[in-house]
Amino acid sequence: MALETCFRAWALHAAPAGGKDRLLPGSSSTSFAPSKRAAAAPLSVGRVATRRPRHVCQSKNAVDEVLVADEKNWDGMVMACETPVLVEFWAPWCGPCRMIAPVIDELAKDYAGKILCCKVNTDDCPNVASTFGIRSIPTVLIFKAGEKKESVIGAVPKTTLTALIDKYIGSS
């Protein structure tokens, strides 16, 4: 029954472009009868199969979301990154961490291709947190060329983080 429903939905939307015949369910559940009703949005099956994905972003390093860093991918994601990296150390039970999370998400979108934004759950990755002396959360660190450049402790306003990022994306 589910397969028949999927086929029925596919058949309704897979009419040839420019054709007026459309398949509609007939009187029985397993037969279909052609209809002369004009298609609202005709779609060619061949054209769908050859459609290529659109490239929205030109930069190969543009990531507009916050990535999750952990002990396994830390070196490759943060230390070996050519662009500046903003890393937020957080925990799920931390109220201020939940307050700053949407700000970090916005920064990832605003600075896509210029910085990489990551987050590290200190409960899941205590070794990474202790390596960088994280004693309070949320803590935001800025890395450039594998070096820790600056840190900000607490749920700070977006303008504070923007000023911090702007210092490192302009200089090489």
Image (cartoon, rainbow, N blue to C red):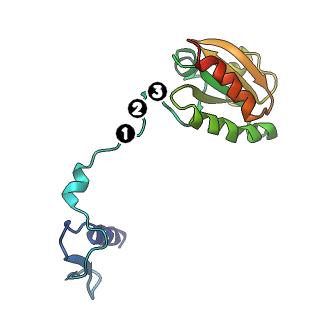
Q: Which residue is mark 1?
A: 55
Q: Which residue is mark 2?
A: 58
Task: Identify the image quadrant of the N terminus.
Answer: bottom left
Between the C-alphas of marks 1 and 3, the distance is: 13 Å
Task: Identify the image quadrant of the C terminus.
Answer: top right
Q: Quadrant of residue 140?
A: top right
Residue 28 percent across, percent down from the top left: 27, 86
Q: Badges 2 and 1: C-beta atoms under 8 Å apart? A: yes
Mark 1 neighbour class, 10 Å CA radius: few under 14, some 14 to 19, many 20 or more: few
Residue 60 percent across, percent down from the top left: 42, 27
Between the C-alphas of marks 3 and 2, the distance is: 9 Å
Q: Which residue is mark 3?
A: 61
Q: Is residue 122 visible?
A: no
Q: Mark 1: which amino acid?
A: His
The image shows residue 59, relative to residue 43, as above or below, that is: above
Front residue of this view, candidates 87 and 27: 87
